Image: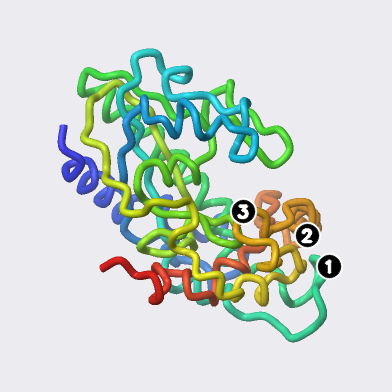
């Protein structure tokens, strides 16, 4: 099975999928209706027995022993497919604005834009649906497949989980981590990730980097953008973001307007918009 075929199939699904367009029933405001959430995807593959899964990610300073290997999610697993769905320019542009006020408390003008919140909530629903459709794609082809983040065994402890979509994407050659702990891909970090484990044998994607933070220039733009003051480049990439401070700020953003049908939208994403790595690898480290 060729990755190019899967990529074309996923692209068609994204371009024609109704869930990728904000409809009137869920839109927070009339201006959101009809806006597309995601652009064309990036897709990568990692071998299920890659040492990153079986060794590195289980180290305490990375994810820890909580992490489950592909084999533990799907016995006989051979490949892990990771994908990144970049937000459209309209969604990204909407979240670039900010004020010069002191760090906010989750209820000021620095909160996420409505479009960004749609990307986080409705966008994640679309990612989940795409994972399930991708599993069905493999199953119909005579293989087994599973989306770990959607299984009952998936769990989160503190700020770690037993299956991290960002780390899976890193293993699949899609990008490296930045100071804000987002993953910088060739289409930036503003978007959503998903992954599927399968026993289909696919050729792994070549990782064009040799360190976990290769694409980050430590420019400090995300630090200046963070309304919670959670990022400090003096601590370096590995420890530059205080998850406790970030988490408290995001929880405060639950005061965002509730959408139709009682949907509660929350988020921030200011460190992913209006920065050099928003929609690409920073020019200083561009690989091609």
Q: Is residue 94 visible?
A: no
Q: Earlier in the sequence, mark 3 or mark 2?
A: 3
Q: Is residue 55 visible?
A: yes
Q: Is residue 238 left or right of residue 76?
A: right
- Compared to residue 149, the image places residue 33 above or below, namely below
Which residue in the protein does label 2 denote?
A: 249
Give the residue displayed 40% in from the left and 59% down from the top: 185
Closest to the observer, 89 or 244: 244
**Contact flag, marks 2 and 1 (Cβ < 8 Å):** yes
Q: Earlier in the sequence, mark 2 or mark 1?
A: 1
User: How far apart in space, not on screen, are marks 3 and 1 (Cα)?
Assistant: 25 Å
Mark 3 Cα-neighbour bin, 10 Å: few <14, some 14–19, many ≥20 = some
Which residue in the protein does label 3 denote?
A: 238
The location of residue 214, given as percent across then percent down, is: 44, 59
User: How far apart in space, not on screen, are marks 3 and 2 (Cα)?
Assistant: 21 Å
Give the residue displayed 35% in from the left and 62% down from the top: 186
Q: Earlier in the sequence, mark 3 or mark 1?
A: 1
Give the residue displayed 69% in from the left and 62% down from the top: 235
Mark 1 Cα-neighbour bin, 10 Å: few <14, some 14–19, many ≥20 = some
- Compared to residue 151, the image places residue 209 above or below, namely below
Q: Is residue 117 left or right of residue 173?
A: right
**Contact flag, marks 3 and 1 (Cβ < 8 Å):** no
Mark 2 Cα-neighbour bin, 10 Å: few <14, some 14–19, many ≥20 = many
Q: Is residue 144 left or right of residue 114?
A: left
The location of residue 215, given as percent across then percent down, is: 44, 63
Asked which secondary structure carries label 2, the reply is helix
The location of residue 126, given as percent across then percent down, is: 45, 46
User: How far apart in space, not on screen, are marks 2 and 1 (Cα)?
Assistant: 7 Å
Closest to the observer, 106 or 103: 103
Closest to the observer, 97 or 287: 287
Identify the mark at residue 105; answer none if there is no mark. 1
């Amino acid at each position: 099975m060729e990755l190019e075929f899967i990529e074309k199939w996923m692209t068609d699904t994204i371009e024609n999928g109704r869930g990728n367009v904000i409809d009137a029933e869920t839109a927070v405001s009339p201006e959101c209706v009809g806006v597309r959430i995601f652009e064309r995807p990036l897709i990568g593959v990692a071998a299920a027995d890659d040492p990153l899964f079986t060794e590195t990610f289980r180290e305490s300073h990375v994810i820890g022993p909580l992490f489950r290997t592909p084999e533990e999610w799907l016995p006989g697993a051979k490949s892990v497919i990771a994908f990144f769905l970049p937000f459209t320019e309209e969604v990204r542009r909407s979240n670039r604005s900010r004020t010069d006020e002191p760090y906010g408390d989750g209820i000021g003008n620095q909160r996420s834009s409505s479009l960004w919140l749609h990307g986080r909530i409705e966008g994640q629903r679309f990612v989940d649906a795409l994972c399930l459709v991708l599993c069905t794609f493999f199953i119909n082809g005579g293989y087994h497949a599973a989306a770990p983040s959607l299984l009952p065994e998936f769990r989160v402890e503190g700020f770690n989980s037993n299956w991290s979509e960002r780390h899976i994407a890193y293993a699949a050659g899609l990008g490296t981590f930045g100071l804000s702990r987002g993953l910088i891909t060739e289409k930036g970090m503003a978007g959503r990730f998903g992954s599927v484990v399968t026993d289909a044998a696919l050729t792994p994607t070549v990782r064009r980097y040799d360190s976990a933070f290769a694409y980050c220039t430590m420019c400090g733009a995300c630090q200046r953008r963070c309304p919670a003051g959670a990022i400090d480049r003096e601590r370096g990439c590995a420890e530059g973001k205080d998850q406790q401070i970030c988490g408290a700020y995001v929880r405060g953003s639950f005061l965002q307007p509730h959408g139709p049908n009682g949907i509660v939208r929350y988020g921030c994403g200011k460190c992913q918009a209006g920065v050099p790595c928003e929609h690409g690898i920073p020019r200083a480290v561009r690989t091609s």
